[in-house]
Amino acid sequence: MRDAVPPDPGGRVDPSGRESVRAHDRLGRSWLDAEPAHLERILRLRALLNIIWFVFGGFWPAVGYAFAGLVLCLLIITIPLGVAAFRMASYAIWPFGRAVVQQPDAGAGSVVLNILWIVLAGWWLALEHVITAVAQAITIIGIPLAIANLKMIPISLFPYGKQIVPTDSLSAAQRPLHSL
């Protein structure tokens, strides 16, 4: 008779004793506690969605974030804003399989940086998401991509105090603010 393995506080352990992947749906159920073939299908689907996203709407917002990052890094004093712009460009170009979560140690500095971000780059990057979403929504097939683009507006306006993490590393206690 085999002894029961206690669950890992950050995830769950299946009866075979191997640690399961720590991604959970909105109800806290682990949706990746599945067979390896099922996990492979999920990873293929994410890759397919990311390729579709890149071709039909992710490229231009990513270019906008990268351009903002270059301009903000040239101004020297706004280099922290430029780094955030490059981080957002990475997310805008390949969002499926990643989630945005609140940073637990974000303080008053993130509020100040968010205000500077909105004034210098955030408002026109959010406008770029709206324009891209409208262009996608004109085609019936592009409506899901338009919705995903609109979901990215809050993070494009307030990037500080948030982290972009792989959905596989989310614990049951972490609630994503945004995930695709």
Image: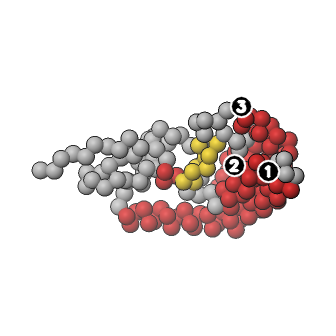
Q: Which of 50 and 108 is in front in this view?
A: 108
- Which dot, 3 or 2, sits closer to the camera? 3
User: Tag 3, which secondary structure?
Assistant: helix
Q: SS of the residue at dot 1?
A: helix
- How many residues crowd mark 3 within 10 Å: few (<14), some (14–19), many (20+)? few
**What is the three-letter code of the residue carrying label 2?**
Met
Choose the circle earlier in sequence order: 3 or 1.
1
Residue 85 visible in the displayed image: yes
Which residue is at a point 25% across and 46% down the rendered structure image? 5
- Residue that mark 1 sits on: 79
In the image, farthest residue toward the left:
1
Quarter assignment of residue 16: bottom left
Label 2's element? loop
Viewer-side residue, 168 vs 8: 8
Residue at the (76%, 43%) spot, across then down: 157
**In this figure, which colouring scheme has been used for the structure?**
secondary structure
Residue 61 screen position, x and y as percent: 76, 58
Kindly report the distance in space between the C-alpha atoms of the residues bearing marks 1 and 2: 22 Å
Residue furthest to the front in view is 76
CA distance separating discs 3 and 2: 23 Å
Check disc 2 and report the residue beneath it.
152
Residue lying furthest top? 108
- Say whether marks 3 and 2 touch (CB < 8 Å): no
Residue denoted by label 3:
108
Question: Residue at point 78% right, 59% down?
Answer: 66
Q: Residue 22 carries which label?
A: none
For the residue marked with disc 1, what is the amino acid? Ile
Say whether residue 125 is visible.
no
Query: Do labels 1 and 2 touch, CB within 8 Å?
Result: no
In the image, what residue type sits under mark 3? Ala
Q: Nearer the viewer, residue 178 or 1?
A: 1
